[in-house]
Amino acid sequence: MTERRRNILFLMTDQHRVDTLGAYGNPHVPTPAVDELARTGTRFDRWYTPTAICTPARASLLTGQAPFRHKVLANAERNVGYVEDLPDDAFTFPVALREAGYNTGLVGKWHAGTVREPADYGLDGVHLPGWHNPVDHPDYLAYLDERGLPPYAISDRIRGTLPNGGPGNLLAARLHQPVEATFEHYLATRAIELLERYAEDVHRDDKPFYLGLHFFGPHLPYVIPDHYFDLIDPESVELPRSIAETFEGKPAVHANYSAHWTFDTMPIEVTRKLIAVYWGYVALIDEQVARVLAAADRLGLRDDTAVFFTCDHGEFTGSHRLHDKGPAMYEDIYRTPGIVRIPGGPEGEVRQEFVSLLDCTATILDLAGLDQAPAVDSRSLLPLVRGEQPEWADDIVAEFHGHHFPYPQRMLREDRFKLVVNPADTNELYDLHTDPDELQNRYHHPEMASVRGRMMHRLYTLLRERDDRFYHWMTSMYDVGELDYDPMMSGLDESTYVQVP
């Protein structure tokens, strides 16, 4: 097998905070498998999601396109009118790999569309629809039955109270199953089975593979067995400093979302327990990652297999008095773990460049020796993973379009400052050097005028270059510099724009 046709193992979690992993500085959560990946590969410290919501982020991974371009902008479960599937002629990397002679498979969470399934993109494996562990799926029930394992059953439910007095969303519960019966163990088992099949083709026919293993966790609700539910002592949990959030000077939607997620209806001790259970969920998944990586080594695949570990977006777990994710572009849900290990690459690399889940698409194509151009908003990470020093942008853009309701946002993140443009409410500007917890919105502070103006112009320029038409709002609302086009798009009033010779 040539260097340009590597096997690819893509390990993906869902709604995963970067600060839950030992490799990223958490001393309390046992994550030896992921930590070992970081030790033997490259850890990215500024890895961001293009949008902090499942389906649009996963569609971006498939296509290498930013959400505004592929137009799958919301999860089907809360869709507010956006399209729910990619067009039939959309470029996707699994189809490109399949056409190039790869085996391609997916085990676990799909959630990248409603009508079209993984098989429509050439991906082997059982289709597991939805946003949470589908514990009533026939294949999972067959797995339990074949092994004489008990069915799904829970107790000790944790939830708050909604503003209308109803029960809040389920946040966590104790699962009455052994680890072998958990959905996470089931997914790892199915991934190992497919890996064994693919390994035969690798060794017999030199046929490379792409295998994605997508866990549904640690997305809430955190439903895990006793050992993991009680693994972390809540007293050892240091509460996030942003739990002191007052929402003063912030968009009103932040306080509304806090009420929706019932934060203030639960004692602070419950928040500590929720974080502890979330960390236990991460430990459970790490053990399943270890099983899959051990299988790859046993099958003689390590020397020819690139391994990715990342997620679709982060999770609040009480930060800013919020849970889940939503229309608040904080680091908690936009900055995520990202680790890449390639055969023969340097070990223990730590990169500070701003990179994105989007960049995985071009990287996968690069590993397969395929044209990266169709992944138009993606850039291969291989030069960074190889320890090179290519020119790289010193900022990154992210976007959001709504979840329970339409709510467009755009974000520009650079080394020190973050700008968030919210047409429906006040804009945000954070100084991440002096205020890493993003508690103080400094957008309207007079002393920030030059930073605000510079970043607004930069964001505007980037959106125009991409043809992300969110920029039209910015044209009329902010000082974005001299215009070289007719913002009215009418051609009738020459006094409103600068004429271009």
Image (cartoon, grey):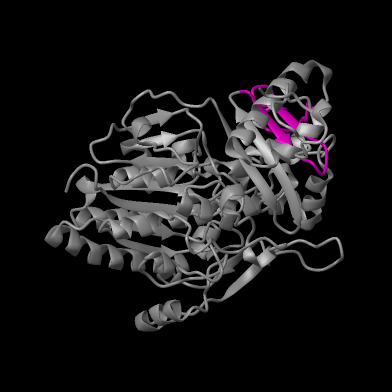
Residue 55 horizontal/vertical position (percent)? 57, 58
Residue 202 horizontal/vertical position (percent)? 18, 58
Q: Is residue 455 left or right of residue 152?
A: right
Residue at image point 18% right, 45% down = 2
Q: Is residue 231 visible?
A: no
- Magenta segment, principal secondary structure? loop
Look at the picture and state if 363 lies above or below 56: above
Q: Is residue 201 left or right of residue 481?
A: left
Say which quarter of the image contains residue 454. Answer: top right
Which contiguous range is marked in magenta? 416-443
**Camera-nearest residue between 329 and 459:** 459
Look at the picture and state if 222 lies above or below 326: below
The magenta stretch spans residue 335: no
**Camera-nearest residue between 209 and 195:** 209
Q: Quadrant of the C terminus?
A: top right
Q: Is residue 194 left or right of residue 16?
A: left
Q: Is residue 140 visible?
A: yes
Look at the picture and state if 356 lies above or below 305: above
Look at the picture and state if 7 lies above or below 201: above
Label tally: 0
Residue at image point 40% right, 83% down = 145
Residue at image point 35% right, 80% down = 147
Q: Is residue 155 left or right of residue 63?
A: right
Residue sticking out furthest to the left: 204
Residue 208 horizontal/vertical position (percent)? 23, 55
The magenta stretch spans residue 429: yes
